[in-house]
């Protein structure tokens, strides 16, 4: 026989399931929150349905004792038993990163006690100002003078500081960089960070897309808890997510595209080819870097998107499958795209064989291929 206790907007349904080995009564609980749009009569009808359903699940043993496990502990089991064997490395890395903040908020709550309101409160907290508590640093000295103006000085300093060359250039130009990078630059110069940089807090709410990423992590874990009969329903399903209204994707308009193509004409083919081909084909970055010559029919202009090349911090570069089943596809590209590939292929062939192009030796055999991009290399 079930008992029902109303707690605010939530109903707690308790069903007894016998006595355990220690003589203690086993109780299973379900927290159910009705939709605010339901009338009192509809709430009563749905509550009775939830009670009957929960009693049946307890009776048949489909509600496991694992419902008493904390969310953080179940998430760890999920990652070990399902995540690592089945998720793509990029997805796995995102889940691991998201779980740090998720566990701080709801990790202590038992699965059977976790409600939509807990999850909703977490999402609301992520939208508050100051949640992204980090510091940014803006250089207040002539950093280029400290690094040196000689050829290759910036690259050498970047390697010594273990900071990307782009970040060093950003600091030199007086643009803000993150505090960790500023600390590394200052340490490489033997200076205190505050002597070289103006450090300021940079608190802002998380973007809607980031909050939705947290939701995907929580929902995926709880959906598996339902499938493994730890809880009857997924409380994340009813959570309200922030709207993506007003979010605009960044893209090149026609004048910008023409200008970029003009500037590319002065660049070597090894850089010009991947950028122009990506512009003409519309491939995702990972799809572009995953292309192989064997995936391209130069006679018909058909490209087979069959693999991707991705990077995960700590794991390095790995070859994977396209994002979705529909992403594994055949794509017809223009004659212009094929011509740029042929020019690139000729360049690559000439480098390997040390041949002359336009009266000049194309490069040093055996060395240039290591400096070329990963685009369309033999793998």
Image: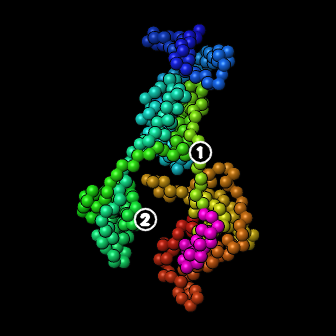
Secondary structure state at the residue bearing disc 1: loop
**Picture residue at 58% right of the left edge, 78% below the top:** 265
Which is the main secondary structure of the residues drawn in magenta? helix
Residue 79 vs residue 215, the one in the foreground: 215
Secondary structure state at the residue bearing disc 2: helix
Tally of numbered discs: 2
| Residue annotated with mark 1 | 244
* Residue 229 image point, x, y percent: 58, 26
Location of the C terminus (image quadrant): bottom right
Location of the N terminus (image quadrant): top right
**Picture residue at 60% right of the left edge, 63% below the top:** 252
For residue 135, side relative to residue 61 (left or right):
left
| Residue annotated with mark 2 | 166
**Picture residue at 53% right of the left edge, 83% below the top:** 362
Asked where in the image residue 116 lies, by quadrant, the reply is top right
In the rendered structure, which segment of residues is drawn in magenta?
252-272
Magenta stretch: includes residue 242: no
């Amino acid at each position: 026989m079930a008992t029902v206790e109303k707690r605010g907007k939530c109903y707690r349904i308790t069903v007894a399931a016998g006595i355990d080995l220690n003589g203690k009564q086993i109780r299973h609980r379900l927290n159910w929150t009705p939709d605010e749009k339901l009338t009192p009569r509809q709430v009563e009808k749905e509550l009775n349905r939830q009670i009957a359903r929960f009693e049946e699940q307890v009776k048949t043993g489909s509600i496991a004792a694992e419902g008493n496990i904390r969310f953080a502990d179940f998430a760890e089991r999920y990652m070990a038993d399902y995540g690592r064997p089945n998720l793509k490395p990029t997805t796995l890395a995102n889940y691991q990163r998201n779980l740090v903040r998720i566990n701080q908020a709801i990790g202590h709550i038992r699965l059977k006690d976790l409600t939509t309101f807990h999850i909703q409160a977490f999402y609301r907290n992520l939208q508050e100002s100051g949640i992204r508590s980090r510091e940014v640093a803006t250089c207040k000295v002539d950093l280029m003078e400290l690094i040196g103006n000689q050829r290759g000085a910036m690259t050498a300093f970047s390697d010594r500081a273990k900071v990307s060359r782009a970040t060093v250039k950003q600091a030199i130009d007086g643009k803000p960089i993150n505090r960790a990078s500023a600390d590394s630059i200052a340490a490489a110069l033997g200076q205190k960070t505050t002597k070289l940089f103006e450090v300021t807090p940079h608190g802002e709410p998380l973007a809607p897309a980031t909050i939705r990423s947290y939701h995907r992590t929580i929902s995926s874990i709880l959906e598996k808890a339902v499938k493994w009969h730890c809880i009857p329903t997924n409380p994340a399903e009813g959570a309200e997510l922030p709207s993506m209204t007003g979010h605009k994707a960044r893209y090149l308009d026609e004048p910008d595209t023409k200008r970029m193509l003009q500037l590319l004409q002065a660049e070597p083919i090894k850089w010009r080819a991947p950028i122009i081909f990506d512009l003409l084909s519309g491939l995702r970055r990972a799809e572009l870097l995953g292309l192989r010559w064997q995936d391209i029919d130069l006679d018909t202009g058909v490209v087979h998107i069959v693999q991707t090349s991705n990077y995960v911090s700590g794991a390095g570069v790995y070859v994977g499958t396209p994002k979705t089943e529909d992403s594994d596809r055949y794509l017809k590209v223009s004659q212009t795209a094929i011509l740029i590939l042929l020019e690139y292929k000729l360049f690559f062939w000439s480098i390997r064989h040390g041949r002359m192009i336009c009266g000049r030796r194309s490069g040093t055999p055996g060395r240039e291929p290591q400096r070329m991009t990963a685009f369309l290399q033999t793998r």
